[in-house]
Amino acid sequence: MANTIPAPRLAREVARAELTRAILASARRQLAEVGATGLSVRAVARDLGMASSAVYRYVSSRDQLLTLLIVEAYDAVGVAAEAADAVAAERGDGPAARWMATCRAVRGWALEHPHEWALVYGSPVTGYAAPQTTVEPATRAARVLASITADALSQGSLEPRPAVGTSAAVADDVAAMITAGADTGRNPDVVARSLLAWVCMVGLVNFELFGHLHNVVGDTAGFFDGAMRLAAEQVGLPGAAA
Amino acid sequence: MANTIPAPRLAREVARAELTRAILASARRQLAEVGATGLSVRAVARDLGMASSAVYRYVSSRDQLLTLLIVEAYDAVGVAAEAADAVAAERGDGPAARWMATCRAVRGWALEHPHEWALVYGSPVTGYAAPQTTVEPATRAARVLASITADALSQGSLEPRPAVGTSAAVADDVAAMITAGADTGRNPDVVARSLLAWVCMVGLVNFELFGHLHNVVGDTAGFFDGAMRLAAEQVGLPGAAA
DNA sequence: TGTACATCAGTGAACGCGCGTTCACTGATGTAC
DNA sequence: TGTACATCAGTGAACGCGCGTTCACTGATGTAC
């Protein structure tokens, strides 16, 4: 009964991967408790019962640890959005319903992971410069919304609305990227309005998370829903006001 | 030629007021350089050439220093908004133009004071609990927008739009407060839509300030203008799309 | 299968730093008679 | 106007803390013959 489970040459690599995961998990836990500012390499080491210097075998600096967490967070929001949209699409929801499902999923994730959300959508950590690694994951969630409008457009169920000055401002490559893979020619108005909706949505979630709605809005979920319905209508999705 | 300038009994109080101002000014400078997280009592003392312990004669703790800066920042945004609206109103601008002027002023202030803006509209400082002192100043800028819509409503130049579920969520006392002093009965739809516009605006400024529009929107000022025009239209202000 | 060597993981001590806050003290500014 | 006392501003040393990062070292895991 030879124990063949670990591939022989990889035994060390497996351990390495495991510990790397453990370090990230601990960092995530710490982030949830003390926020990005309070995140420290030493505390992670303490949590894992190892010498602080040992962490440096896995992570080259505190900044890199932050970067990993940022990428993770962006991806997690993206996954939540994609999953919600996929479920909605599978049960035959139209664009407007998919839109709402996606928005709710993003807000839900934010409420469950406030510090991770703040890490990516709140004030930048002072003295930290985000590397290129973070830019692609950053767009993941927004692209779900974009793909919903693109689908609606290609199905002919979206009437584009003129975007009053915002369209021209959106960089060409973004418009290209967003509409890429969709059967529709790029429509700058739709792209601009989708982007604006996304920005408002993140802004609203931030407002709620950062406490600016305290004693201002009672039913924050209802307010969010209403706002996102308006946003969908603004983008041109039909049936959103229902 | 007796030097009667300082009121005799107040000489010490004058010096006290002066130094308090100096401490705040230094803290503001430091905030602009290293952000809220990096703000330290010792650095302020160093900057002013005094012992770190001396600062505690004027400010009871680091948290109180933060609170003072927060109140200052809220007030400064409010003043900028009020001034811009007043100028616009005085030259006879209509509600839509006043709206745009106010929005631009807020964004302008934010771009000039990014760290102060982030202090109040970015992620909350970990471990800091905002005291009651901050809640009234926090509403100052938003109330300018609210008063513009209230004016328009009372002049009959605003047709309220139904607010699809957002209205009911806005707390009653806020609706009351916002419409107080205006000749119009409270209109929850208008209040809700104004609030939403304010939230989107802050969200958009945050997006720009925190770098999320990099390589996404080229002409951020133009994008902002377009977005705020749309927002004004949504609130029901006439002539905004012009 | 066994031995000699190379690679890597993890340790513990150390460097150098900055922080918030307290405390006993000196010296100047105010007050009461 | 002058003296005796109280108040307050500012000092400098200290407490106790945590941090990021480096470095020489031990011991285990892998590799080549």
Image: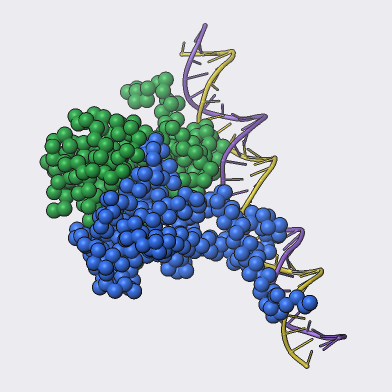
Chain colours: A green, B blue, C yellow, D purple
Which is nearer the eye, A117 or A228? A228
Q: Is the residue B168 above or below the residue A242 in the image? A: below
Q: Is the residue B186 above or below the residue A31 in the image? A: below
Placement of the N terminus of chain B among the 4 image quadrants = bottom right
| Residue at (26, 55) in percent of width and height | B239
- Where's residue A13, x and y in %? 43, 26
Left of B242 or right of it: where is B206? right
- Can residue A81 be seen? no
- Which residue occupies the extreme front position in the image? B91
- Where's residue A15, x and y in %? 43, 30
Which is nearer the eye, D33 or B237? B237
- Can residue A176 be seen? yes
Which is nearer the eye, A106 or B150? B150
- Where's residue D19, x and y in %? 56, 45
| Residue at (37, 22) in percent of width and height | A7
- Where's residue A8, x and y in %? 40, 21
| Residue at (73, 77) in percent of width and height | B4
To which quarter of the image does residue B150 belong? bottom left
